[in-house]
Image (cartoon, rainbow, N blue to C red):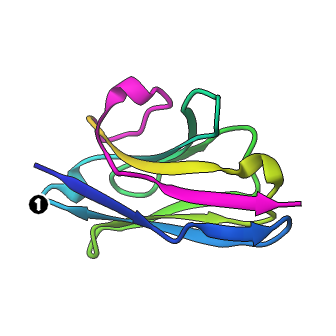
Amino acid sequence: QVQLEESGGGLVQAGDSLRLSCAAFGRTFSTYAMGWFRQAPGKEREFVASISRSGHGTAYADSVKGRFTISRDNAKSTVYLQMNSLKPEDTAVYYCARDSGPYGSLRSTEYDYWGQGTQVTVSS
């Protein structure tokens, strides 16, 4: 069993930065890729970023490319999402998830464990 706990969300102004963290509890963190997704009110959950098990491979949604950075620390079983130049349209609940494989996928159906989510609100 794997548990994922996100933290770091909050209310910020446009242009500010936030760093989300996701701590994983379980013995196999370094075996799997990890991802971040988000869901805004009235919208479907969407892919934000993924990182391979080694950390060398990353992928980003076009909407966040150049502003967000995903990273991981396998020694701490933690994945991070550094979010810079935040925009009001980034407002959403952000979820971290564990991929069922090692490389990272854009599809939510490839992820088998999910956190409870952390709210990010960006005011204009």
Would residue 101 appear left or right of 122 to someone viewing this image? Answer: left
Residue 19's place in the image compared with 109, above or below, is below
| Residue stretch in magenta | 101-124
Q: Quadrant of the C terminus?
A: bottom right
Q: How many marks?
A: 1
Mark 1: which amino acid? Answer: Arg
Mark 1: secondary structure: loop
Inspect the magenta stretch and tell me whether residue 111 lies in it: yes
Residue at horizontal 56 percent and vertical 66 percent from the top? 9
Residue at horizontal 74 percent and vertical 66 percent from the top? 84
The answer to whether one can see residue 51 in this image is no
Residue at horizontal 50 percent and vertical 31 percent from the top? 106
Q: Judge the density around disc 1: few (<14), some (14-19), many (≥20) Cα neighbours within 10 Å.
A: few
Q: Residue furthest right?
A: 124
> Residue 62: which quarter of the image?
top right
The answer to whether one can see residue 110 in this image is yes
Residue at horizontal 43 percent and vertical 29 percent from the top? 108
Inspect the magenta stretch and tell me whether residue 107 lies in it: yes
Tag 1 residue: 27
